[in-house]
């Protein structure tokens, strides 16, 4: 990036958009209705491409293709090692196309391409490799039966998995759900978010090139209440894995309950706390608070949007934070290599974040820095740091999903823990201290699915990623994610005269 800066050349070229249709049974096809929707460049609001708009009939076709591939196709029947081999090829293709994919994500979602390449695409390829390695290690147990019987469990693929994903990390979300499903032997129907449909279609093409048989991966771009709801309520979809808002998570569960009681897993919103104690390295703590809030323009479910700083160092922390934010650059992710932050994903999100900022001001919080729109066009916002925030303010309670940090003071460890837990969410949490006893108390007491000590956002494909309470259940990544796509079958036979 430094070299690119010197040469003045943009580091990533604007990619050509090659795939805009639904991907069903190995082919790119128009929607049954013939309808399309527009996906826009958040740097300008201009249309990038018209994308086929999937609806209920298209979901039916995609589910039928996935069902046939599951019931009659080779994918669930081939050996785990062969599935793993093909998935590894898919991972290699993702890596080979990392620049193009990263640029596509920037164009469609306003992300920084260099970071996207390193973080999102690295994680995506990593996830495919991780679960490729697991595909031949799926087995049941031998049971110690009572009486003259022998028993064992088989772990079988569940069937057709519906995967509904959000717009903030499109490539990663696609792969962290697709990879364990494929390793288990399931077939899938993916619905990317309407804001960012392009990378999922690009990935579908790579999957085909890798040799994943037709019908195993189907991709239906479209809107939530139509295409998404059709997946959630489909009688022939055997499980749904969803990442998105808590509000839609409820609808997914309801749809499952009203249809075929498919198991669902939900990775939802958060309002995660970051607790900074007075013995912390304050420069490091400032960097952590910034990245925990403004990484990916704050569009991250685990963003630490509540930052608690111990009273005795609060003023110093606030001063250092304000100072550091002066050199923070909001800019065009594809043309300004200095940019730390690109535009919010779309107009609706941009307006939502700005209205939360206005609300915060009206509630009596003080803006330490930022909080205003910036740039001539597009959906850019200067990251906002609020001080004088009270626990019962809307900005301290609701997930904003944008670059808005709430700074608060605390006195004791007990108080910090109680306030950190004073939320119905339970996704991430962070603690910054040199005192390992304090760290350990926070780690054990905080209600969250992920806790970071003296770091934030550090993740790896073997880290289970998911929450508690209104942040959902049944997270992604790590070996336990495989279980979401497997059913346990118990087999019992007499010891003598065994039918086996
Ligand atoms: P966000 O608020 O972050 O945009 P959403 O929860 O609205 O997140 O969206 C996440 C994903 O869920 C998207 O793919 C979206 O289209 C889909 N979705 C939205 N509404 C529904 C619904 N009623 N049923 C199923 N999926 C939906």
Image (tube, rainbow, N blue to C red):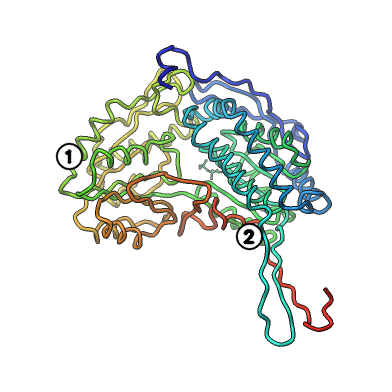
Relative image position of residue 4 (x, y in whole percent): 44, 17
Q: Which mark is residue 263?
A: 2
Name the residue carrying label 1.
316
Determine which quarter of the picture holds residue 104: top right
Q: In the image, what residue occupies the spot 51% across and 23% down?
A: 45
Q: Earlier in the sequence, mark 2 or mark 1?
A: 2
Query: Assess mark 2: CB under 8 A from ligand 1?
Result: no
Quadrant including the C terminus = bottom right
Relative image position of residue 301 (x, y in whole percent): 45, 45
Q: In the image, what residue occupies the spot 69% across and 33% down?
A: 206
Task: Say above or below: 384 vs 420.
Answer: above
Q: In the image, what residue occupies the spot 27% across and 60% down?
A: 437
Q: Quadrant of ligand 1?
A: top right
Toward the viewer: 277 or 24? Answer: 277
Secondary structure of the residue carrying numbered label 1:
helix
Left or right for 420, reference 263: left
Q: Residues within 10 Å of mark 2 (few under 14, many from 20)?
A: some
Relative image position of residue 112 (x, y in whole percent): 47, 28
Quadrant including the N terminus = top left
Task: Say above or below: 47 vs 66.
Answer: above
Q: In the image, what residue occupies the spot 49% across and 19% down?
A: 11
Q: Residues within 10 Å of mark 1 (few under 14, many from 20)?
A: few
Are the residues at dot 2 and dot 1 in contact (C-beta closer than 8 Å)?
no
Task: Say above or below: 71 vs 22.
Answer: below
Secondary structure of the residue carrying numbered label 2:
loop
Toward the viewer: 488 or 245? Answer: 488
Relative image position of residue 238 (x, y in whole percent): 70, 56
Query: Assess mark 1: CB under 8 A from ligand 1?
Result: no
Toward the viewer: 486 or 367? Answer: 486
């Amino acid at each position: 990036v430094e070299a690119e800066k010197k040469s003045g050349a943009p580091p990533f070229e604007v990619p050509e958009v090659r795939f805009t249709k639904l991907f069903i049974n190995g082919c790119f096809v128009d929607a049954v209705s013939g309808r399309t929707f527009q996906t826009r460049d958040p740097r300008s609001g201009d249309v990038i491409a018209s994308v086929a708009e999937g609806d209920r009939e298209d979901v039916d076709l995609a589910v039928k293709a996935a069902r046939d591939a599951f019931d009659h196709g080779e994918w669930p029947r081939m050996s785990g090692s062969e599935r793993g081999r093909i998935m590894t090829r898919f991972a290699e293709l993702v890596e080979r196309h990392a620049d193009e994919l990263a640029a596509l994500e920037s164009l469609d979602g306003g992300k920084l391409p260099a970071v996207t390449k390193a973080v999102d695409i690295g994680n995506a390829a990593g996830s495919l490799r991780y679960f490729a390695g697991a595909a031949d290690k799926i087995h049941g147990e031998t049971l110690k039966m009572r009486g003259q019987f022998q028993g064992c469990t088989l772990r079988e693929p569940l069937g057709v998995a519906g995967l509904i994903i959000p717009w903030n990390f499109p490539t990663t979300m696609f792969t962290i759900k697709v990879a364990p499903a494929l390793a288990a032997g399931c077939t899938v129907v993916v619905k990317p978010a309407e804001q960012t449909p392009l990378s999922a279609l690009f990935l579908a093409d790579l999957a085909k090139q890798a040799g994943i048989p037709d019908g195993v991966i189907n991709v239906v771009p479209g809107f939530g209440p139509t295409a998404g709801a059709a997946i959630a309520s489909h009688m022939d979809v055997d499980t749904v894995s969803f990442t998105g808002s808590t509000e839609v998570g409820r609808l997914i569960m309801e749809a499952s309950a009203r249809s075929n009681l498919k198991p669902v897993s939900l990775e939802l919103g958060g309002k995660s706390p970051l607790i900074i104690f007075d013995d912390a390295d304050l420069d490091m703590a400032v960097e952590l608070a910034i990245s925990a809030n403004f990484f990916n323009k704050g569009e991250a479910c685990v963003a630490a949007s509540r930052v608690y700083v111990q009273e005795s160092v609060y003023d110093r922390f606030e001063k250092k934070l304000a100072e550091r934010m002066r050199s923070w650059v909001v800019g065009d992710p594809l043309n300004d290599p200095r940019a730390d932050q690109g535009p919010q994903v779309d107009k609706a999100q941009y307006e939502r974040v700005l209205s939360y900022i206005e609300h915060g001001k009206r509630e009596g919080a003080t803006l330490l820095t930022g909080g205003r729109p910036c740039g001539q066009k597009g959906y850019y916002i200067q990251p906002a740091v609020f001080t004088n925030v009270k626990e019962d303010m809307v900005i301290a309670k609701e997930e904003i999903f944008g670059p808005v940090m709430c700074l608060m003071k605390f006195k004791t460890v007990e108080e910090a823990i109680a306030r950190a837990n004073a939320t119905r969410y339970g996704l991430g949490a962070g603690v910054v201290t040199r005192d390992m006893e304090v760290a350990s108390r926070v780690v054990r007491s905080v209600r969250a699915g992920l806790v970071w000590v003296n770091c934030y956002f550090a993740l790896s494909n073997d880290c289970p990623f998911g929450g508690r309470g209104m942040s959902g259940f049944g997270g992604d990544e790590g070996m336990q994610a495989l279980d979401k796509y497997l059913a346990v079958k118990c087999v019992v036979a007499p010891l003598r005269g065994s039918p086996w």
